Amino acid sequence: MQTILIVDDEDFFRDRLARAFAGRGYGVFPAADYDEAIKIVTESKPALAVVDLKMPGKSGLELLKKARNIHPEMRVVILTGYGSIATATEAVKLGAVNYLPKPADVDDILNALNRDGATTDAGRQDDFEPPSLARTEWEHINRVLADCGGNISEAAKKLGLHRRTLQRKLYKFAPSK
């Protein structure tokens, strides 16, 4: 039986992926953070891993680096809701076989894990359409707001905006591109 480590701080998403992989015959090791994941990698040496990039405490990139030192044969896919070219490049440099945006389903993850490194989407620049500045700003604002636990005043302070300006930006719909 092939084994997979699923690391995500969002309980619902982690549990959904764990059930889906278990339903396909995988031995699943769920973990909510860096420390749990490193313990599982050290003790169980799973063959595959799906790691969220942004977690409280140490990031998915830090986890990737340490886990690959412990178990170099493990194939890792990084998932994120707030990706950038810089973090995708860093993830691949650290040993990830691929980098996927959230939400990703089991088929997307399995395809990414089974791809040969020479044929990954990261190498196809002609298919890449960079997000607009408005989209990037909207994603950044929402990430900072999430990091602040939904506290608009705290998020506005971190962003260097007036609270009302931030509220107006939040009421706008996300840009399509």
Image (cartoon, rainbow, N blue to C red):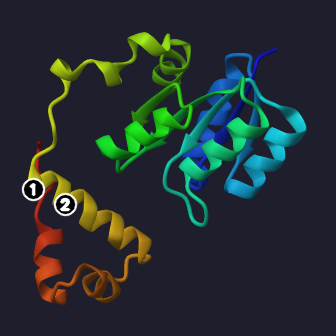
* Residue located 11% across and 82% down the image: 165
Q: CA distance from mark 1 to mark 2?
A: 6 Å
Q: Quadrant location of residue 41?
A: top right
Q: Which residue is mark 2?
A: 138
| Numbered mark located on residue 30 in the image | none
Q: Answer with left or right where residue 174 lies relative to residue 8.
A: left
Do we see residue 102 in this rendering? no
Label 1 CA crowd tier, 10 Å (few <14, some 14–19, many 20+): few
Do we see residue 155 in this rendering? yes
Residue 133 vertical position relative to residue 65 in the rendered view, above or below? below
Badge 2 amino acid: Trp
Residue 102 position within the rendered picture, expressed as x and y whole percent measured from the top left:
40, 40
Local secondary structure at mark 2: helix
Residue projecting furthest to the right: 43
Residue 1 position within the rendered picture, expressed as x and y whole percent measured from the top left:
82, 14
Badge 1 amino acid: Ala
Pointers 1 and 2 in contact (CB under 8 A)?
yes
* Residue located 69% across and 21% down the image: 23
Quadrant (top left, top right, bottom left, bottom right) of the C terminus: top left
Q: Which residue is mark 1?
A: 134
Residue 74 position within the rendered picture, expressed as x and y whole percent measured from the top left:
70, 26
Q: Quadrant location of residue 4?
A: top right
**162 or 89: nearer the eye?**
89
* Residue located 17% across and 79% down the image: 166
Q: Answer with left or right where residue 121 lies relative to residue 34.
A: left
Residue 176 vertical position relative to residue 98 in the rendered view, above or below? below
